[in-house]
Amino acid sequence: MAKKRIILAQVGSPKTSKVSDVRSYLREFLSDPRVIDLPKKYWNIILYLFILPFRPKRSAKAYKRIEFCGFFPLVEVTRGLARKMQSILGENYTVEAAFLLSDKRLKTALVEASANNEEIWVLPQFPQYSTTTTACVTDQIEAVGLTDEVNLIPSYHRLRAFIDLAAQNIEAHMAKYPADVLVISFHGIPVRYVTEKKDIYYQHCWETFLLLKQKLSLPDEKIHMSFQSRLGSEQWLGPYTDQYVLNLVETKTANSIAVYCPSFVADCLETIDEIGIELGHEIKEAGGEIVFVPCLNNGEQWSQAYTEFVVAHINRDQEKIDQLTYKMDEQEVIKTLPKQGTGQTKMDDKAKKTVKIMFLTLFLDLIGFSIIFPMFPALAKHYLEVDSENYFLKMLFGSISSLTNLAGTDMSAIVLFGGALGALYSLLQFFAAPIWGGLSDRYGRKPILMISIFGLFSSYLLWIFSGSFTTLILARLIGGIMGGNLSTATAAVADVTDDTNRSKGMAFVGIAFALGFIFGPAIGGILTLVNPLEHFPGLAVYGLNPFSYAAGFAAILSLINLIFLMTKFEETLPKNKKLDNFKTANILKLFKPLPYPAVNRTNISYFLFISAFSGMEFTLTFLAVERLAYTSMDNAYMFIFIGFIIAFVQGGYVRRKAHEVGEKKMAIQGLIAVIPGLVIIAFNHSSVMLYLGLFFLALGSAMAIPTLTSLVSIHTPKDEQGRSLGIFRSLGSLGRVIGPIIASLLYWKFGASIPYLLGAAFILIPAFILSKLSDR
């Protein structure tokens, strides 16, 4: 008779608590597609840029806390269980522990057993089956080509001994250390694994919980189920243990809370440190106490009972197996299984329609707004040639000369001309946005949008016939004032969304901005290649100019936008919510602090962020030309790249995950992500480094801007959405006035690197302010 090899398969632990060993362990663990199933090319970016540089140091400290004489509990307890089972079974069996990520490796044990012609039994030490744990074991069995030779016991979540001994363990600890309630905390997995991949794990957890609940003499309100150890930003099984337990304490539901973790048969980092130490400290600070209930480990009773269960399987004794296992009606279990969701409320049909219309409105608006960007140098040259004696033109270039003298360098007047026109537009938006927002709170979103878009249409008509610089300035004045309607469009999105899906709606606003800034400059550049004066020279007397085709295209877009709004858009602000929030003729009073501290803090954070970010945008082309000899087309490619990254991140990540991660948390993550981008660009001398920096800048802004917008909306009453978001947009416009001015002065006075390095340090201020924001 062939000797039987019993292999207790466990995950394992790092070799030591050194950061390098923990990093190697995490790299291997998190590279397993069973654990993280995201596309490898995307996951590797996250893993190597965001996780491995930072998480190992924190994890190493945690492993150090549970390390004993250079050993880790999970490994030593599993080896101890193997020794006890060997003692019970005798010489006809070989029992050993093997690990996925520690020595002795599972693959090695399997190859040795096969070479000795032994009957192989593999026992994954995960009570509940999951594709993230047990399937990792089967993958390694398949990898060594032993699928047909290996016998597997995939789970034991309903094993009587497992349930009964766990209940005895819990009761003994609660008798010694009285607790108000018991929380049964399972290891979490992403909800998607259950809903899409049909992982049975959640059902197994529920069965274990029900059996423990039946066995324990506790009333229903005294025993709770939760999930721990989530990783990343997507929705995991919930409720989350840390949040749930903290809520029990903060709501005075319980003060002393016992926690038991039946996903683990051996104590490890997730039980001893995550629950016993970290959660214990957090709850203590909140005024409560954690009673940590250890796992079964390799206790005598468990070792004996588990061995009996394994032998029944080896002997194919189904009757004995049935006796050792609790029976449950699977259909009844499924009926009572609590539903897991994403936490988001789905938008109704009206909300979806409104968001789509506002997306198109903003997209068309932003194309018209940005279509002028590539024309600034040519505009300056044109009006200097045809209208050199114009009062406003002389005044503008006189101011630029003064600025040049102040900076002490030969700054390009033509480049600053474009900046001046841009700053004028942003300054007007700064004052106009809260006015439009307040008026929309009073009269409704639709009439204000109609008026402002008609105003934009008028400004573009003026631009078509701006033969003089004065007419161009007038067109820009009207356009800047009417461009403040962006706050009204944003408020309309806020009207039809709630706290759970507002970030999704605001992400569409962000995508419209990104796409508008992609197509606008591209269309503007193409249309300036054709001079309408060559086709209609007789119209020069009416002010037709080389830029009239671009102005005409923007006018057509505004007219289409106006007609579309008139026929398709339904008012989003209910009549009973229209209030008179516009009570002053003093514009500056509109910017006094709102009676909502969270909104004020978010507004300040947004202003500081946009000031730093827009300074980067303004000087980026200078840096690219100076260091890399970029042409205008090369510069256009940069902004197209930024726009596509923003659109991709906001469309594929922010709109789906912002509420799950938390708007505040994602906004802070976005701000922090901008910092490496600024630092990389400060020191870059190659296109590869430049585009790497641009990636971080685009990633960070894509995460920060829509979530900051959502935070303002979430913390503002429904009847003041327009005014509040108007102030938010205005402060952004003010940041786009101040940021470029400061950044350009720093650039020309101290060199290319300084504005980026100072900007990176400056971003920490809004991140700190947001960290103090109260959770909603």
Image (spheres, grey):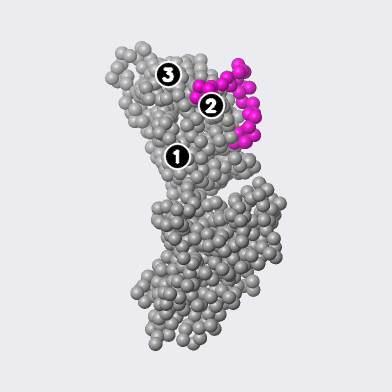
User: Local crowd at mark 1 within 10 Å, few (<14), some, or many (≥20)?
Assistant: few
Disc 3 is placed on an element classified as helix
Going 48% across and 23% down the picture, which residue do you hit?
A: 445
User: Local crowd at mark 2 within 10 Å, few (<14), some, or many (≥20)?
Assistant: many
| Residue 714 x %, y % | 56, 35
Q: Which numbered marker is on residue 329?
A: none
Q: Nearer the viewer, residue 323 or 421?
A: 323
In the drawing, does residue 709 fall left or right of residue 769? left
Q: Which numbered marker is on residue 346?
A: 1
What type is the residue that disc 3 sits on? Phe
Q: Nearer the viewer, residue 581 or 411?
A: 581
Q: Is residue 434 magenta?
A: no
Task: Give the residue at mark 3.
Answer: 454
In the image, which residues are magenta?
A: 574-602
What type is the residue that disc 1 sits on? Lys
Looking at the image, is mark 3 or mark 2 earlier in the sequence? 3
Disc 1 is placed on an element classified as loop
Mark 2 and mark 1: Cα distance apart in space:
23 Å
Going 68% across and 64% down the picture, which residue do you hit?
A: 175
Mark 3 and mark 1: Cα distance apart in space:
33 Å
